[in-house]
Image (cartoon, rainbow, N blue to C red):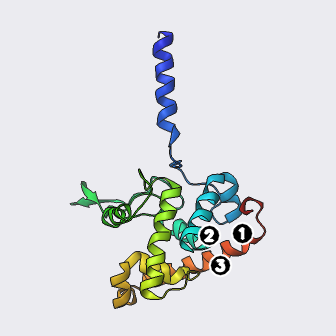
Amino acid sequence: MSRVLRALVIVLLAASCGGGGGGSGSSPRNLDNACSILEQRPGYFRAFRNTERRWGVPVHVQMATIYQESKFDSDARTPFQYSLGVIPIGRQSSAFGYSQALDGTWKEYLADGARRGARRDDIRDATDFMGWYMKQSHEELGIPMWDARRHYLAYHEGRTGYRRGSYNAKSWLLRVSSQVGERSVLYQQQLKGCRAAR
């Protein structure tokens, strides 16, 4: 193999692994420890703090929601659906990225003044999107910014569904939202003693 061809292959391989714009593709290790997450991904904390300053959503609420939505995987997508158990017919929804934003809601966010070139697989944009969405939930539904459980219900069901109480018919969702609330408290406690969060 010529040196030029070998160099080209190396460049292409490096580019395919790069995950530019903050998206690393894979999750950090030890997702039960907020400090460990931030130590592995220093850029995360800057994104979380920027969102907290701009929209008022605490870092631990953002982290607990992202954990539930994508396990901090920038390329997370919903599973495929299959016809007859074998023929793929598309994904369960258009949710993608750290925040699992749906296509339609992401378009609303882009139209409402998002950063030019914003992407769902970029932690800065994903957290800003969540802050934007949760700020509206706070204003329209009166959900306190620190209440990760209720914010998760509004995030999952949409604000109209939340107003109707659609989550009350979904025992699994009530259970999951409680877990999000508990994880938010856990992360909040951990962040108090975390060097990476200073």
Mark whose residue sits in front, 3 or 2: 2
One can see residue 63 in this view = no
Element class at badge 1: helix
Q: Are marks 3 and 1 in contact (CB under 8 Å)?
A: no
Q: Indicate the position of residue 94 as horizontal and vertical percent values.
A: 32, 61
Mark 1 — residue? 191
- The residue at the point 47 percent across, 36 percent down is 16
- Assess disc 1: are there few (<14), some (14-19) or many (≥20) residues with their C-alpha within 10 Å of its C-alpha: some
Mark 3 — residue? 185
138, 34: nearer the viewer: 138
- The residue at the point 59 percent across, 81 percent down is 146
Element class at badge 3: helix
Of the residues under marks 3 and 2, which one precedes in the sequence? 2
136, 36: nearer the viewer: 136
Q: Are marks 1 and 2 in contact (CB under 8 Å)?
A: yes
Q: Indicate the position of residue 116 as horizontal and vertical percent values.
A: 42, 52
- Assess disc 2: are there few (<14), some (14-19) or many (≥20) residues with their C-alpha within 10 Å of its C-alpha: many
Q: Amino acid at mark 1?
A: Leu
Q: Amino acid at mark 2?
A: Val
Mark 2 — residue? 59
One can see residue 184 in this view = yes
